[in-house]
Image (tube, rainbow, N blue to C red):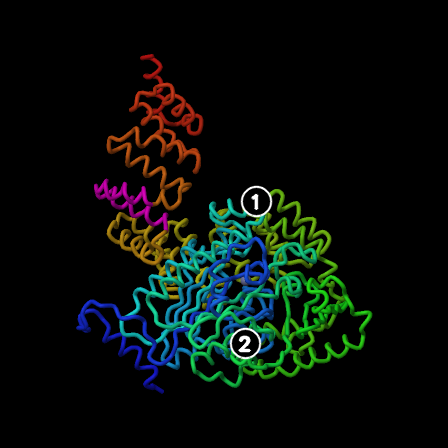
Amino acid sequence: MISLHTVAPHALALLAAPGLLALGCARAPLAPPGRPNVLLVTIDTLRADHLGCYGHPGSATLVLDGLASRGIRFGTAIAHVPLTAPSHASILTGRTPLGHGLRDNGGFALPDGARSLAEDFRRAGYRTAAFISGFPLDRRFGFDRGFQTYDDHLPRGNDPRRTPYVERTADRTTEAVLRWLEAAPSVAAPFFLWVHYYDPHAPYEPPAEYLARFPSSPYDGEIAFVDAQLGRLLRRLDELSSGTVVLVTADHGESLGEHGEETHGLFVYDATLRVPWIMAGPGLPSGRVAGVVARGIDVAPTLLDYAGLPARADVEGRSLRAAADGRDQGDAPAYVESLFPQLQYGWAPLHAWRTARFKLIDAPRPELYDLGADGGETRDRAREEPGRVDEMRGHLRAAMSTRTPSAVKEMDAETAERLGALGYLGGGGARATGAAPRDPKDGVRLVARLGRGMEAARTDPAVAIRELTAVLDEDPGMLVARRTRAVAYAAAGQHDAAIADLRRLEKDGRLSAEDAIVLGDNLRFSGRLKDAVAVLERTARENPKFAQPWLSLAEVKVKEGKNAEAAAAYERVLRLVPDHIEALRGLGDLALLEGQAEDAAARYGRVLEVDPADAGAMTKLGVVRMRAGRAEEATALFRKAVEREPANGEALLYLAGALASNGRPAEALPFFERALRAGPRSSMALNGLGLTRLAVGDRPGAAAAFRESLRLDPKQPDVARTLREMGGRR
Ligand SMILES: [Zn+2]
């Protein structure tokens, strides 16, 4: 049914279109007609106790601290899962994982029955937009529901294979948000905006300036960088908008070595579950610290409350407005879980029940902590207090058995089947057969070894293969070790070994869609193109919402020389993910290959509209301009690419080449040298360097470059002749 609410925003947008609106040039503020704008910021992997306002001594979180002092903060806020996707699902739906059904990163999508607060805002006439910085929240997992704009363009094109952690850094995400804010029509409905920052997630690699400020804790450097970027966003928002309710929280913390865990996901201790919760804006008091325990499921009802909208009955959380206002609001217990140890390692899952004072972890050997006296959860009291263990376990299991059936009804069939196969629909996670699963706390040593292997998979594959093989020798059920070893084998160029590991997963029925892509790529690299096509086409069929199989398929078709089929596969990607950067780039490269310069320029230009910082597209657009004889324009593009990515070998080489061929050899020289340091020492680059050195009169330098070039590729008669002539004249 069409209501005024759904029609109004379109009508307003139409009115605001250029030419239709005769209001002159003054930009009206983004004025909410009666309702406030709402900004939800989630900072991935952010421990509460690493912020100044939560008592961290050496922090540089001035923006978040300032927000807390002009608004309110909850002293204790708890995430329900120490994992990005399930925890964000709780934040957005107001339901625990038992209710929304998304139990792990990657393997699950948000079921249709689990509604997002973005849908509530949308129905109420809000404009909705989300800006995502990490792969686990890719639209394929269902988080785009209710958002008119869902910007999940990651710098390397939503491609988890190219780097171990694909992320968009906070400066780029902020720039994308600011572009959206500035483009807002001057007469506008209020907005609901969700901004997700990913920087504090491992690996901890803050920009140089922040690394220099936090040399011994780069994690804090990442946090300080996000804080500064959030400051940019909030300042501009203040200029544009008359009233925005801002809520900043996190999906989970980071263990940083506590309990033997380096990162997050395995355990359910507060190190990875205590997150910040800071709010400010119209209707909120200033400088208050609320004592009630806030939970992830309380975010959605609280935000809807401040916007004057009702929360739906199926929400498990509650609005914390009363507590924020300083009124009495009793604590509610939090259900907590991590199925990660089971789904990824084949160990026991963890479920926990957390009250304001105590936490029970329902592991094979249960643990009980008195959080009031022992916030670090270092002294297990389970043996001393069996009565409390039984009582809390009773609450936990009751929650698990009563909430599950209603959720299952609304879950889509695929998710229900997946959960059923894993034994979760009974509510207990019991295993039907086999030995008792390992208690995660008994396997933490293996996890450290696994972590070393995973970290080195792409950068130091020999180390990774050694560590992961040792892990698999001890626990062959750790599937993640096998999948990662396949990645390491691939990085080492041992494609047959990679294929063997992946075929083994396939035989055991545990080949995930992501594994299938890696398998397809290894088949492609080892020249078995028909097998690659078979695997990728099957994966595309079985995962109709996934763009990645089509992207890999396109690369196989390029290798087969079937350009039209490759282009068709890239177009499939674009239908699934409009403006997918790698698909646009692929189409641009194909057009360039076929000499369709304007088509290529249009594709690269589109990449740059989506991500103005994409140095690869700048470089390729430069190549198109160069070929059209527009040398100055090309040089400017190459220069910009090099500024953006000072170690981009391709951009450096093109810049050097453009300068050299335009009679500026002295200027070109340092760029040739940098290109050779940054990229492969190709004969083409060495010949360019040699000719340029010759042009500036450096004959010995030129000869050295030509000699190295000939060592790499002896079949270059022209180079050999030049070298001979130089020798003869000496
Ligand atoms: Zn996360």
Residue 321 lies, in percent from the top left, at 51, 79
The secondary structure type at the circle numbered 2 is helix
Residue 208 vs residue 161, the one in the foreground: 208
- Which residue position is annotated with label 1? 494
**Range drawn in magenta:** 614-640
The image's mark for residue 215 is none
Residue drawn at x 34%, y 70% is 241
Q: Nearer the viewer, mark 2 or mark 1?
A: 2
| Amino acid found under the numbered disc labelled 1 | Gln
- Which residue position is annotated with label 2? 298
Residue 180 quadrant: bottom left
CB contact under 8 Å: marks 2 and 1? no
Residue 459 lies, in percent from the top left, at 55, 44
Residue drawn at x 32%, y 47% is 620
Local packing at callout 1 (Cα closer than 10 Å; few below 14, some 14-19, many 20+) is: some
The secondary structure type at the circle numbered 1 is loop
| Amino acid found under the numbered disc labelled 2 | Asp
Magenta-span inclusion, residue 451 = no
Local packing at callout 2 (Cα closer than 10 Å; few below 14, some 14-19, many 20+) is: many
Residue drawn at x 32%, y 38% is 655
Residue 673 lies, in percent from the top left, at 39, 31
Residue 573 vs residue 704, the one in the foreground: 704
Residue 621 lies, in percent from the top left, at 29, 48
Residue 508 quadrant: bottom right
